[in-house]
Amino acid sequence: MQSLELFDLSTVRALTEHFTGIKRGIEKESLRISPDGYLSQKKHPHALGATLTNPHITTDYSEALPEFITQPSTDRLKPLKELKQIHQFAYQNLGDELLWSMSMPCVMGEESDIPIARYGSSNSGQMKEIYRLGLGHRYGRFMQTISGVHYNFSLPDSFWKALHEQEGAELDLQTFISEKYMGLIRNYLRYSWLIPLFYGASPALCDSFLKNKNIDLDKLTEGTRYGKYATSLRMSDLGYQNKAQSRLNISYNSLDEYIDGLESAIRTPDPYYAEIGVKKNGEYVQLSDKILQIENEFYSSIRPKRVTQSGERPTKALRRRGVEYIEVRALDLNPFSEIGVEQSQIAFIDSFLLACLFARSEPINLRETGEYQENFRGVVRKGRHPDLCLTVNNHCVSLKQFASQLLTQIKAYSQVLDSAYETTEHVEVIDQLFKQLDNLDTTFSGRIVKEIESRQDGFFPFAMEISQKNKHYFSQNLLSESLLSCYQKDAEKSHAKKEQIEAADNLSFEEFLTSYYE
């Protein structure tokens, strides 16, 4: 069986002092809804700042899909503290509206009822809006209303220098760092099904999302469909793992191969997208007719990242300066937390990512790609089935047996993190997951299904009640005056910065777009 086991754990322990320098950041999306549970038709609240330039709050696909962003921090507890503060600030400016508590959306009307996010008249603002128009034409707007949590993770320079020296690497330091991050990503892809297994929280959805399509889901209650053993329909082919990109074979075997694959997709025309056209009646409907409009259109549960400079494409930044951090994108919104994610989840992911970094990570061939993709699909659709098997090296392996082995191996890294932070939290999380493995109905997805079954009133009332409770919680837990003033000032600054960007544009949009792709 494949393994995350390290040959010599003393190598990891020798680096313990550097783990307190790990940086973390969170990006959390959630739909803004009206009091009756429908998608908000109102503009993004002005008091929350300009979505183009506010460092704390932007929008994702829709004007009604705010995204809260915490700043990178080496304080392991700070991201959730900051995320809570952003929620407090947002709720103080939402009026009677709520934030939807689930990844799968609220009651859906027509696609035309989903407002595209607006970013102003600047070239960069227009590009973000047109890109979203293109996504709607390519995949439909419904898919774009699904929400999730993205987790950003990076190890400190001191760690990389120490590991570089410890291994006697001949590569220059940045190339070494990029190579190690890509190895981490390959192992993550092999075992990423662990995240939806324990933290998948979208086993059910509102019938209105399906629009009478013939989808292989069972009826849970009136108006609610579900997968009996599903963990994360968000990460199934109903959501981000869509069939439209199934022909893309982006390699993670090296940073250059990854970049080349994305660059090729951005340059290669697609007949269907060409039929849509780039413009209709003189107005842009998508940025290009290529397989991908931009790199971020490629849906993946993990990405290598580098902070970009103004006007710089992500692949260019990676090519020039290498991998800086990774973005984990497989987390559903956690409805059992007022802010959609909890510290125990972060503790597990940190341990998991360290295990992925230090374990052997051979290149992934096409056979193994097919295996890990099928394993992931199996877990998101049937992960709680008591007899589910996964495929490893062409052999069928019990999910529970495989997960138990991986948790045992990950626990060693939890112990190292506990030692670094002088806590017991990381090991306690692993012990809790072992218990859940014995009864998968105690996972997030199992709890959600059992709750809806016992209530017998459906997905919507269940999610609406949680959303209302969250709103009440934040109405009783307001920001301090000093923090409120800070967020208000940042919002005001963001509007001024947006206006400056609009005033400084000296290229036509066509010239700007040509320059961007070049």
Image (cartoon, rainbow, N blue to C red):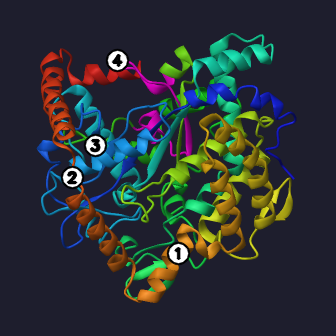
Residue at mark 4 to residue at mark 3: CA–CA distance = 19 Å
Residue at mark 2 to residue at mark 1: CA–CA distance = 30 Å
Helix or strand or loop: what does disc 4 sit on? Answer: helix
Residue at mark 4 to residue at mark 2: CA–CA distance = 45 Å
Q: To which residue does mark 1 refer?
A: 447
The image position of residue 436, as x and y in percent, is: 66, 68
Disc sitting over residue 478 in the figure = 2
Choose between 136 and 483: the one closer to the eye.
483
Residues at marks 3 and 1 touching, judged by CB atoms closer than 8 Å: no
> What is the crowding at mark 3: few (fewer than 14 residues within 10 Å), some, or many (at least 20)?
many
Residue at mark 3 to residue at mark 2: CA–CA distance = 42 Å
Residue at mark 1 to residue at mark 4: CA–CA distance = 50 Å
Q: Is residue 66 left or right of residue 217?
A: left
Marks 4, 2: nearer the viewer: 2
- Classified by dominant secondary structure, the portion drawn in magenta counts as loop
Q: To which residue does mark 4 refer?
A: 515
Marks 3, 2: nearer the viewer: 2
Disc sitting over residue 293 in the figure = none
Q: Earlier in the sequence, mark 4 or mark 2?
A: 2
Choose between 242 and 53: the one closer to the eye.
53
> What is the crowding at mark 4: few (fewer than 14 residues within 10 Å), some, or many (at least 20)?
few
